[in-house]
Image: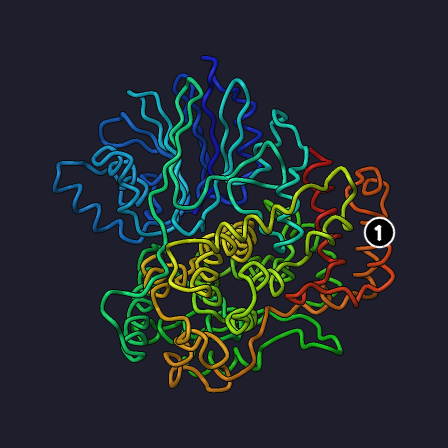
Amino acid sequence: MCGLYGALSFDGKTISPEHAKIMSAKVARRGPDDQEEFYDGPVMLGHRRLSIIDLSPAGHQPMHDSSGRFCIVFNGTIYNYPELRELLIGKGYQFNSHSDTEVIVNAYACWGADFVERLHGMFAFAIWDKQRQSLLLARDRMGIKPLYYARTPGGFYFASNPQALLATGLFATDIDKVGLHHQLSLHAVIPAPRTLIKTIKKCRPAFTMQITPDGKLKERRYWSLSAQRPAVAMSAEDWNGAIHDALMQAVEKRLTIADVPVGVLLSGGLDSSLLVALLAEAGQRDIRTFSIGFEDQPEERGNEFEFSDPVAERYATDHQKFLIPNDEVLTRLPQAVTAMAEPMFGQDAVAFYLLSEQVAKSVKVVQSGQGADEVFAGYFWYAQMSEARAEPDLQRFASRYVDRDHDEFCDTVTAAYRGEDYTSRLIEEHLNTEQADSFLDAVLRFDITTLIVDDPVKRVDNMTMAWGLEARVPFLDHQLVELAAACPPELKLKHQGKGVLKEIARGRIPDAVIDRPKGYFPMPALKYVRGDFFQFMADTLNSQRSRERGLFNRDYIDRLLAEPEQNFTRLNGSKLWHSALLEYWLQQHIDQT
């Protein structure tokens, strides 16, 4: 797990070392253990290392293949690299390390660009071919690892976050109207390749990009998810058994492929509790688990220790709990926003930031339960959508998911930022697919391949990597996802959602954890806005900078401020918090560029 950055010149000039230095500083927290750049004619590849596999100097990046023709910078973990390494050795390739990085670069030398289809893991990388003078970029199937890019007439630049690109001063910071529509309608999800900033793009999950010094860019999709039933019918018991086995394999891979200890972020929910149970079932002892809690509000508890504690006790984990007071949350909020590659509305972003700070003092790698709700239909809105059979597909989805309908979006922002109903168009495109057997299959496929990438997945990556902590997400193992996507939706919807997982969990974790109402990472102070938190949001939105920007319709903001606890989205998010967070992110990342 690392930070990467680089550039390819289109005008024959060498990439500026000053730009490399600036970009390196902006991804430094992702890789605190090592740093270096590689220059070769028009290309520069840079890397900040977090040492997880092969901790020796042999794992240093940028790294070359055995022939010296190819050079790579890589962020991520390849879980099947030992098997690929043996295959390559059998074909005559030599290795100087025991790292997965060297396997990737030699695999490219052996099989060409199609080799990405052989990779099992999470990854973002760039490989320079000295002979052909071409640069290959790739991102993993589920978009777990980030990869941003931008172009000028003179070159192509890429990095693990957009701040590294913007800090060079080469790119304008105008807001993309389409990206803004998605930001405020899909609770901060802006699907690739767009971002909130017009000039900054992101590589799409399951895509490669080939760039040459003449400025040509060629994209290729190497994987696509099918949400269709298998040719041979399976019983409910068959599905439970198959999914248990696939999840067990995913958990084991994410445990054994590391040369450092691996812990678990134990939230108190079904998903992370099941990970602990499966680790124990796999024979792991002395499991390290970590939980965080916050101050209560009258309407909502601020922690879930009553659910995480029994799991830790049952499996005798080495358990650490952290209780964070509200005044510390507000004090540390600016740091968490600074760590956000893009604006994130999820109230648990700050929670993950503070938890990761503590966890990173004990371990470098954790497993986390992100993705289970989307893959196995755990959220309340899936059942509501499924039952609304008489409604058109767009209404069936949008009326239960979208934060602001187009009319409200137009009321939220000023005239300069309005446009067409871009979000409805995006939803219709994804629901109208031949790769899904039913409406709910299409919804889950849309969520897994697109929406989840830029909400919980990005949030966890950003907040953990801010502390040099690698988060592994077994529920997003692509083989498990493929199996789950083929599973009939009615089995996922059983037991108020995540039916398959609940049946697998029965007997492995306490019934109270399985049968509890669906919970969310609690941080009540950012949902029920009052006191110092309200004042922070009001000050942000009423600031001179906010008024000069002219993004928000002042009448709309005044209405939110007048009733700070009355304006919630369909998914129970605070519209005031959404607005304040977006403005504060712009002040932190754009105004200071």
The x and y percentages for residue 119 are 29, 47
Name the residue tied to disc 1. Answer: 539
The x and y percentages for residue 441 are 42, 63
When asked about the image quadrant of residue 95, the answer is: top left
Q: Is residue 391 above or below residue 257?
A: below
- Left or right: where 166 falls relative to 231: right
Which element carries disc 1, helix, strand or loop?
A: helix
Residue count near mark 1 (Cα–Cα under 10 Å), binned few <14, some 14–19, many ≥20: few
Residue for point 46% across, 87% down:
511
Q: Front-most of 517 and 430?
A: 430
The x and y percentages for residue 284 are 33, 71
- Left or right: where 15 falls relative to 298: left
Q: Is residue 186 above or below residue 480?
A: above
When asked about the image quadrant of residue 341, the answer is: top right
Identify the amino acid type marked 1. Asp
Q: Front-most of 184 and 93?
A: 184
